[in-house]
Image (cartoon, rainbow, N blue to C red):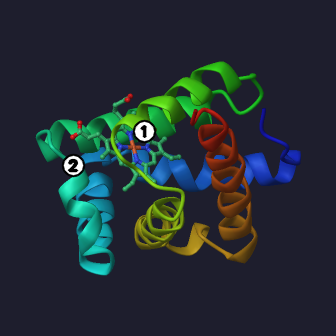
Amino acid sequence: MLDLTDTEKDCIRVSWSKVISAPQTGADLFYGRLFEESPETRKLFKSDMASQGLKLMQTINAVVDNLDEDLSETVLQLGTRHQGYDVMEEDYAKVGAALIWMLDAMAGSDFDQSTQDAWGKAYGQICTVMLRGYA
Ligand code: HEM
């Protein structure tokens, strides 16, 4: 499903390993940034943010663990559920910006420009498939 070079996959794996060693910190940084920069997204989240944050980190972890697998059916269904959460197309860029910011904060010197570009590319491709899941 993801069209990435082996170098891009390596960049993603190396930087993610820094984040996943402290998933709760990653989730807290991510939502803190999202709600500061895009407060209008706060009302979309109805459930408890601690469990929501861990679900998000687990999902990204599953994608990073399966960069060579075809996850399109799972991601399409995730997209259909997000339509049900009232997530609009324009919200994806807000989440993408908070995700890149959190990765930069947590991966430190491993988060160079090629790593940022690799994440941007992967995230863009995932969003495209999620939006294809909208009816
Ligand atoms: C790559 C992109 C994304 C991934 C991997 C992702 C992942 C998830 C996961 C795993 C859940 C748990 C529920 C489920 O599986 O259906 C969820 C729920 C949710 N996501 Fe996302 N998401 C993404 C993008 C977004 C965007 C752009 C928004 C918009 C702000 C968003 C808002 C929400 C909301 C509102 C919920 C439901 C929360 C609740 O139950 O209160 N997500 N997401």
For disc 2, does the CB lie below 8 Å from ligand 1? Answer: yes
Q: How many marks?
A: 2
Front in this rendered view, residue 14 or 38? 38
- Residue identified by numbered label 2: 45
Query: Residue placed at 65% from the left, 44% from the top?
Result: 126
The quarter of the picture where the C terminus appears is: top right
Residue extending furthest toward the front: 135
Position above or below: 62 against 38:
above
- Residue identified by numbered label 1: 82
Residue 8 placement (x, y as % from top left): 79, 54
Lower sequence index among marks 2 and 1: 2
Q: For mark 1, does the 10 Å Cα neighbourhood hold few (<14), some (14 to 19), or many (20 or more) residues? A: some
Residue 71 visible (yes or no): no
For this view, does 3 lie left or right of residue 83?
right
Query: Residue placed at 41% from the left, 65% from the top?
Result: 106
Residue 75 placement (x, y as % from top left): 59, 30
Query: Residue placed at 61% from the left, 43% from the top?
Result: 131
Residue 117 placement (x, y as % from top left): 73, 68
**Amino acid under label 1?**
His
